Amino acid sequence: MDTSGDGRRATGDGRRATGDGRGGSVLFAARSAIALYRLLDLLPVFAGDARVSRVFTLVPGSDFGVDALAAVERVGARSVPWDEACRDTYDLIVTASPKGELHLLRGPRVLLPHGAGFGKTFHGEGSADAASGLDPEYLMPHGGPPPALHALAHPGQIERLAALSPRAAARAAVVGDPTLERILASLPLRESFRAALGTGARRLIVLTSTWGGESLLRRRPDLPFELAARLPQDAYQLGLVVHPNEWSRTGEFELSERLAPALDAGMVLARPYEDWASVLVAADALITDHGSTALYYAAALDGPVLAAYDGGDELIPGSPMAELLAHAPHLDRAEELEEALERYRAGTGRAAAASAFLLPAATAAGVPDQGSALERLRLELYQLIGLSPPVAPVTARLLPIPAPPSRTPSAFAVRVRLDGDETHVERFPGHVDAPAHHLAAEYGVAGERQSQSAALLYRRTGGATAAAAYSVGWTVDGWISHVLDSYPGCRTAGVVLSPVHCVVRVRGGSLVSVRIEPPRENGRIVHSDPAAVLSAVHARPTGVSRVTCVIGGRRYEAHLSPATAEESGRIL
């Protein structure tokens, strides 16, 4: 292989031949979990090829490498210790970080970015003011040759690299971004992702936090709960994407404990591998610091992006991320969210992302468009290995269905506003200290303290387990009577039978059947939580035959009539 550093791309001269039918060995060298995840997005390039062996190793020296090998084990891949990897010779070495003693590995090296836009610099390491990932001090350690291939996502990145080192730029090529291609390919799954998250017609607001002292979670650690406490549960859902380095530094247990108040309010905490991208696809708006995750969202969905970054030394002026933050509305306080979303101008995010990725609308003649990154990488990598590429087409793997929230509120502080014949209902997590008309709690899920304090207690059907030898079942009427007898502070008790049907009784009144008429929007039927309708019924005088509920900004007609014997005798 050519290692003279004369600026020409290596073509296989001087390395072990692999075109004689023996196949090729590929070493994926990861220094951290985030780097490993980017390498896993590359795997479809070699899919189905029995000639290629794939093995992973952990590059030592990173504070964030603890989760990398665990992730390798989760996907069932084979790994080798670093010392063994340094003794062997490989037909290809693929990395997603230029840092570490990669020069000790033997074989042609390919470097992929592990983020988007090269927008950060870390003072005190590498060349002064050089973008992390484009620093010649790491690309060519000890004056050695640059990687055989530096795969980049945009022509502007080659220009930036050339300004730092023409020698390093000579071996760079624009191929696109495999991670973005996975996101774009998965856009048709958006409704499935939202259904898995339990989003419904609510607006999913996702916060993204990078790692380090200037990250959102370090500077504004209370923002997730401030938003969770401020946003009505029936209008908004909250999500959080945390950089894998922060997962590694903090640990899952500690991170979950720090975020417990927001998680108790139903916030989705996306897992660091793949789940984060699925949650981005499901999102309606983003709140971001200077981490590059926002560029993926802007490129794929071009939805509202709000800035929650207060400046510092890491963000590189003029970078795509700097441009995005400069034109995005700034969110100073949780109370300003709705106003900030209204101030966002469509196209702002896409304009910034177009300088980080090859977006279809910004494709120039002769430059590959988005959607061909894996194909171009396959050609480049197989040329380096010395094998002919497989005949089967290479396609990005779709993102997985994201995990639902680990916890959801079991009690709500309910605000009610009567406006003529309309009953406006807003529900907030019950552990939020806020003025409310009443507390509503889900019996059997909420704790005893909240159940004792609730003016409205309800339960849901549909949670039946396998038949037991001995069991006891309530009827609807029997359970409601039992609850009203057992909890003197409870004024109203109800049972949610389906998304459109409840049975309820106000203390001193008779059993009432509630039939909910959900609104239709653009051919869709929009359901809300029926328990919110029970709060509206609770707030209205008894004896009415209809309650017009406004929940999450939508009107739901609730038709009330005496419960039938079949409804009251239904077994729960």
Image: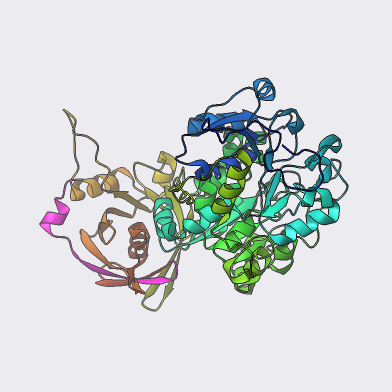
Identity of the residue drawn at 86% across and 51% down = 129
Extreme residue in the right direction: 128
Left or right position of 563 against 540: left
Identity of the residue drawn at 55% across and 62% down = 300
Q: Which residues are magenta?
A: 552-572
Q: Please give the count of numbered marks on the rendered protein.
A: 0
Q: Nearer the viewer, residue 69 or 394?
A: 394
* Residue 13 place in picture, x, y as percent: 70, 38
Extreme residue in the left direction: 565
Q: Nearer the viewer, residue 488 or 101?
A: 101
Q: Is residue 568 magenta?
A: yes
Pick the quarter of the image with the C terminus.
top left
* Residue 429 place in picture, x, y as percent: 49, 52
* Residue 365 place in picture, x, y as percent: 64, 70
Q: Is residue 108 above or below residue 524?
A: above
Q: Is residue 78 above or below residue 304?
A: above
Pick the quarter of the image with the N terminus.
top right
Q: Nearer the viewer, residue 141 or 418?
A: 141
